[in-house]
Image (spheres, rainbow, N blue to C red):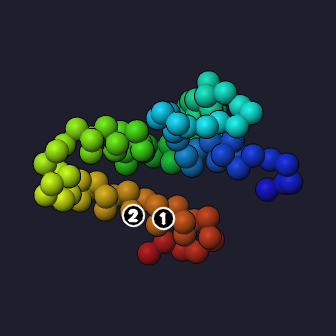
């Protein structure tokens, strides 16, 4: 990446991240609308994780689901939450391998 570029902006353009929209999110000198526009463009162009469709949940979706479930907080992760965590972990490992230039197994 060239000097002077913004990593979050470049990752949004490439389709590897989603815009974090929860309270306290900071966007630097850019607006939230700019981040959302770049995300929508990457989705429409099917770049990065949007190429085959996103199989995990966004950070905002996770927080809403987890905060709404008192049982999950008391008893640990539910079966669905464990499966979702495995899907996300697998997706993140694959992304890391791709970015690191190694083959996925």
Quadrant of the snapshot with the N terminus: bottom right
Answer whether labels 1 and 2 touch (C-beta < 8 Å): yes
Q: Quadrant of residue 30?
A: top right
Residue 77: image x %, image y %?
20, 57
Residue 90: mark in rendering: 2
| Residue 51 visible in this rendered orientation of the protein | no
Position of 14 relative to 27 (above/below): below
Question: In the rendered view, does 36 fall on the left or right side of 71?
Answer: right
User: In the rendered image, which residue does mark 1 sit on?
Assistant: 94
Q: Residue at x 75, y 46 (%)?
A: 6
Residue at 61%, 28% (x, y): give it: 32
User: Which residue lies at the image location 62% right of the left edge and 32% below the top edge?
Assistant: 35
Q: Secondary structure at mark 2?
A: helix
For the residue pair 58 and 43, the one nearer the viewer reads as 58
| Quadrant in the rendering for residue 10 | top right
3D distance between C-alphas at marks 1 and 2: 6 Å
């Amino acid at each position: 990446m060239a000097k002077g570029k913004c990593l979050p902006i470049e990752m949004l353009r490439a389709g590897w991240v989603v815009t974090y929209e929860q309270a306290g999110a900071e966007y630097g000198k850019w607006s939230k609308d700019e981040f959302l526009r770049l995300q929508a463009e990457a989705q429409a162009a099917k770049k990065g994780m949007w190429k085959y469709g996103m199989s995990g949940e966004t950070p905002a979706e996770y927080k809403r689901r987890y905060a709404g479930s008192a049982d999950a907080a008391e008893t640990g992760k539910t079966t669905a939450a464990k499966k979702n965590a495995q899907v996300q972990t697998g997706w993140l490992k694959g992304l890391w391998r791709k970015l690191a230039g190694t083959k996925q197994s």
